[in-house]
Amino acid sequence: MTATPRKHQGGRAGRRVLAAAAGLTTLGALVAAMPAADAHDKGHGHGHPKPSRTVDVQLLSFNDLHGNLEPPAGSAGAVNEKQADGTVKSIPAGGVEYLASSLRTARQGHPYSITAAGGDMIGASPLLSGLFHDEPTIEALNKIDLDVTAVGNHEFDEGAVELARMQNGGCHPVEGCYEKGKKFRGADFPYLAANVTSEKTGKPILKPYTVWKKNGVKIGFIGVTLEGTPDVVTASGVKGLKFHDEIETINKYAKELDRQGVKSIVALIHEGGMPTTNAYNYDCDSAGPGSGLSGPIVDIAKGITPKVDALVTGHTHQAYACTIPDPAGNPRMVTSAASYGKLFTETTLTYDKRTKDIVRTAVKSPKSVNHIVRRDQAKAQDITDLIARWNKLAAPIAGRPQGYISADINGRGSEAPEKPLGDLIADAQLAGLSPADKGGAQLAFMNPGGIRSDLVHKASGSEGDGVVTYGEAFTVQPFTNMMNVVDLTGAQIIQGLQQQVSGGNAANPKILQVSKGFTYTLDMTKTGADRVLVDTVKLNGVALDPAKTYRVAMNEFLAGGGDGFAALGQGKNKLVGASDLDVFDAYLSANSSASAPLAPPAGGRITVVGKVAGE
């Protein structure tokens, strides 16, 4: 049974964060938000707190939705659950119709309930949302009563001006309004970006924090994205912006909130960690507090002031609920709910009305648990109606047949370093850019983070099994990055391969997907750059010559040195080709038919010794 959604209280004007001037077109026109707390009194549920010194506040959280309004397809739409007998079961999950129902059900009986998110609500979205610049997702988040979110790196995919429109509303500056007589309202909830400032003004481009209030209970929320956002977003998306240290920023604003009398504070951080297992319900603290988690968030958590009582994180698309002690030695929860709306986290914060703080002792401290957003529950009708409305607008484009496959070709849902869909995309890029007049590419690289879904054999609509629609291809590669072909020496290519598993990528390797004919061995029992066995790097069976120049195809993000691949950013004689999506679509059309569908690539291009972290 679906609960009636809560209505927002108070005017939306008070929640505006950026200047809402009509025709806002330049970063310089952005007006920094006032750093004063944004108080909203938006309690969920019914009833009154019992006369007691403490009240329990329910914090519901999720992260990395990426505009996945409909249930994610294939293995990308499943979570792994560890069973009592030790086996792992894959369970279909996600879809905002189900997420809305799950949250509304969870809120029942909780007079104090807050819903918060850890960033990347939009960006890298399937066609249903991406085609309309993510307006459908913001509309859906309004309906499910999201109270607050941090920005993530993908909130900057289209730049700060477009992010301002997401917050404040208004029709797209180029494409206008999508529905006759309807103007995009913008987000009813505040986007927080405490560590993102304008280079011009030095002030935050968005509100750094907000304060949730009900019946005298006050909880502050500080939102940050990872400091390394410029390394994982195209340069145009972060132009004119400066990104600051997560720990320093959170500590600064926690101190400011504390001075205002707000003693209960939650940090929303779009940075994360890697668990020791891919089962969402593993015990992160089984070998000691936080023992089941590694990665950047661990050091961040250890450096954040004890004034902060809980950390909602994201970015790595992993599931965990870990206890990492704060600098004072008190227990503190650090959570993440995977991605695509497949999980949500429920955290119980015990609020002491006398101290106005969250109780965090070894005996009684916040407890967090991740819940699956199951698809065997009733759908939220208002979200179903929203999806149907936008699907009707998208249908003429989304349903167009683009190609044919004989079986699932997994990308996002594959945990292997070399992904079948990664091979297919790299092959498409090589085929599209190898002609002399298209760049003369000899090999192609694809970044794994750019593969956003799987190609699923089972029909998603009425198109028939094995048919790849334009919408499905768009969901796989939604960024519309322009393809580049550049000159790189063999030495630079090898250095690029080494950067997959060393430096900033050492703890969480980013394994490039490579085109056919390019082969090498990764030995993960070694450390750093030595993991790439240089003498095994070959192109069409011939050892790569460090002194020779090769023509390499890749998207503009990689060609700009994104994801830590500085060596790939050193290319010369650049030729700009078609978009990655156009190249992929052209390959599907030219190389498959109903009678001769594409089979999943055989693989074997990257030989791996040992185990890659996150695999």
Image: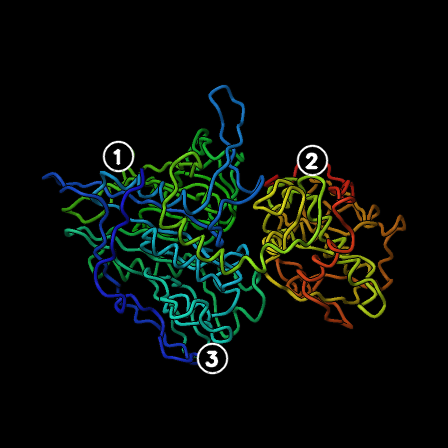
In this rendering, the count of numbered labels is: 3
User: Is 447 rendered above or below residue 343?
Assistant: below
Res. 42 visible in picture: yes
For disc 2, the marked residue is 610
User: Is 534 rendered above or below residue 190?
Assistant: above
Query: Residue 150's spot in the image, x, y percent?
Result: 40, 57
Mark toward the start of the polypeptide (2 vs 3): 3
Q: Residue at x 36, y 40 (%)?
A: 102
Viewer-proximal residue, 401 or 162?
A: 401
Three-letter amino acid code at disc 2?
Gly
Residue 364: which numbered mark, if any? Answer: 1
Q: CA distance from mark 2 to mark 3?
A: 49 Å
Q: Is 166 left, or right, of 469 in this rendering?
A: left
- Colouring of the image: rainbow
Q: CA distance from mark 1 to mark 3?
A: 50 Å
Q: Residue furthest left?
A: 51
Query: Residue 481's spot in the image, x, y percent?
Result: 64, 64
Quadrant assignment for the C terminus: top right
Alpha-carbon neighbours of circle 3 within 10 Å: few (<14), some, or many (≥20)?
few
Secondary element at tag 3: loop
Quadrant assignment for the N terminus: top left
Alpha-carbon neighbours of circle 2 within 10 Å: few (<14), some, or many (≥20)?
few
User: Is 376 rendered above or below residue 381?
Assistant: above
Q: Residue at x 21, y 58 (%)?
A: 9
For disc 3, the marked residue is 26
| Mark toward the viewer: 2 or 3 | 3
